[in-house]
Image (cartoon, rainbow, N blue to C red):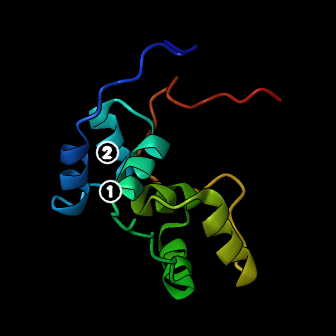
Amino acid sequence: MGRTGPKTRVNEDLLVKRYTVAKWPVARCAREQEISAGRARAILAEHGVPLRGRPELDPDVVVAAYEKHRSVTFLEKAWGASRTEIETILDERGIERDAHGPTPVLSPGRKIPAGTGRTHPH
């Protein structure tokens, strides 16, 4: 028993099957087996399974999506990409980003109930 407790018994055949046949991501395979993603990758490598790489983001698609949604966070979640990766593309293309996300467009007749806004410490 190590510092972190006993090693979890892993069903390696199931892990390989989930990754190769069901096309589950490594992280999902690892969660199912209650192991780290690194350990799951090592097991896949031991079985000779080539890891699928994440495709590169297309800079034109990133710019177009940002101009439509005006939110790096939205793009991060939609694509599972890192904030740094998206911001680097936007910076390289000279796209100015909103400091705090988009400004909501509210119709003049719509009222916001009191107490629903966030307060930020100054």
Kind of residue at disc 1 = His
In the rendered structure, find residue 47 and report the number of the disc placed on it: 1
In the rendered structure, find residue 35 and report the number of the disc placed on it: none
* Placement of 15 over or under 58, stated as above or below: above
Q: Residues within 10 Å of mark 2 (few under 14, many from 20)?
A: some
* Placement of 114 over or under 36, stated as above or below: above
Would you say residue 120 is visible in this rendering?
A: yes
Could you tell me which residue is drawn at 48 percent across and 12 percent down? 1
Query: Is residue 71 rendered to the left or right of residue 46?
Result: right
Q: Nearer the viewer, mark 2 or mark 1?
A: 1
Q: Residues within 10 Å of mark 1 (few under 14, many from 20)?
A: few
Residue 98 on image: x %, y %: 68, 62
Rendered image quadrant of residue 77: bottom left
Which one is in front, 105 or 3? 3
Residue, far right:
122
Tell which circle, 2 or 1, labels the residue nearer the N-terminal end: 2
Residue, far bottom:
60
Query: Is residue 94 rendered to the left or right of residue 109?
Result: right
* Placement of 27 over or under 113, stated as above or below: below
The residue identified by callout 2 is 28
Rendered image quadrant of residue 48: bottom left
Numbered disc 1: secondary structure: loop
Point out the image quarter for the C terminus. Answer: top right
Could you tell me which residue is drawn at 69 percent across and 67 percent down? 97
